[in-house]
Image (cartoon, rainbow, N blue to C red):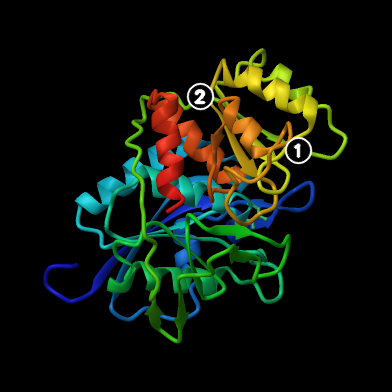
Amino acid sequence: MNDATDERWVHAIALGGTIAMTEVAGGGVAPTLGAAELTGALPVGLTGVRLDASTFREMPGAHLELADLVLLRDRIDELFAAGVDGVVITQGTDTIEETAFALELLSDAEQPIVVTGAMRHPGRPGADGPANLLAAIQVAGAEESRAVGVLVLMDEVVHAARFVRKAHTFRPSAFVSTGVGPIGWVTEERVRVPVRPASRLHLDVAATDPVPPVALLTAVVGDDGRFATAVAELGYAGAVMAGFGAGHVSLRQAEYLGDLAKEMPVVLASRTGAGETARATYGFPGSERDLLGRGLIGAGSLDPFKARVLLSYALALGWPVDRIAAAFERLSR
Ligand code: ASP
């Protein structure tokens, strides 16, 4: 909190994304607006908040890398050390479900970190960026948002980074928290966060730790699984298998994955988009029982995209397979 007043000090960091896009030569929109322009375009003044802003990247969400998030966490830590009460990140919505979860793993700060963006660029009727930014600042400045992990604010809804997913290509209401629902909301200027996630995991990756590449494979009907045979050769350090249903693959793929798990950690997730992977239900070759028996690690309730983020950072820290398995188990509780 700001010493002399009871104002909350919020800092907005811009990374790019549709919220910052304008028309460019050659057609279409691309990120051009920095943090000062975004905060300067807010529709109404903020009461009880001291706001400042900086630009960290100007890129589409698709260009962000897991190593960028480690540098961003360091920048956020500096801001908190300087007395900032809460941070807002504006970025491309395409990757928010992964980047917010990355920050959730990387940061152990109690101060709110709130990620937002826009589904409609500033030139479109009904552009949602200013409203999302305003609400995100309110969430970042609220006492209710402390110690709940990294949050995503879209369309006046507060999501926990661990559960949030982008579930529509265009609508402002594109974001959902599969399986559990959102943990809060903003109404008028009131911030409500009545639900608090039970467990949190901290991976203290340093900017000097290279983040190794992790492959994501998806089960599709009739696929013989030959991609799995190329994973090691391509230089990946780990793999996530987005299996059918509760964690199932084809016969041939089961064999390939078993071989791969002898060389690197392979995590078994579900491509369904919700629910926990099974451990002890099915007994056919290629079932979850078979694959876990071949050395794969169950992703539990983490979806394949978030499982890949966790595995990447665990490998950056050089964690052995049993520690990685324990981390997935912990986040399923
Ligand atoms: N459609 C995206 C967005 O909403 C583009 C991006 O992720 O940069 O921001």
- Identify residue for label 1: 219
Q: Is residue 32 above or below residue 49?
A: above
Residue furthest to the left in view is 4
- Identify residue for label 2: 212
- Residue positioned 71% across, 39% down in the render: 248
Question: Does dot 1 land on a helix, a strand or a loop?
Answer: loop
The quadrant in which the N terminus is found is: bottom left
In the picture, the disc for residue 176 is: none
Q: Are marks 2 and 1 in contact (CB under 8 Å)?
A: no
In the rendered image, residue 51, in percent from the top left (x then y), is placed at: 33, 67
- Residue positioned 40% across, 37% down in the render: 326
Q: Viewer-proximal residue, 45 or 64?
A: 64
In the rendered image, residue 93, in percent from the top left (x then y), is placed at: 60, 56
Residue furthest to the right in view is 222
Q: Kindly report which numbered mark, 2 or 1, lies closer to the viewer in this rendering.
A: 1
Q: Viewer-proximal residue, 311 or 50?
A: 311
**Identity, as a three-letter code, of the amino acid under mark 2:** Pro
- Residue positioned 45% across, 79% down in the render: 186
Whether residue 63 can be seen here: yes
Whether residue 225 can be seen here: no
Q: Is residue 224 above or below residue 151?
A: above
Question: Does dot 2 land on a helix, a strand or a loop?
Answer: loop
- Residue positioned 51% across, 24% down in the render: 212
Answer few, some or many: residues within 10 Å of disc 1's Cα (few below 14, many 20 plus, some between 14 and 19): many
Point out the quarter of the image occupied by ligand 1. bottom right
**Identity, as a three-letter code, of the amino acid under mark 1:** Ala
Q: Viewer-proximal residue, 300 or 185?
A: 300
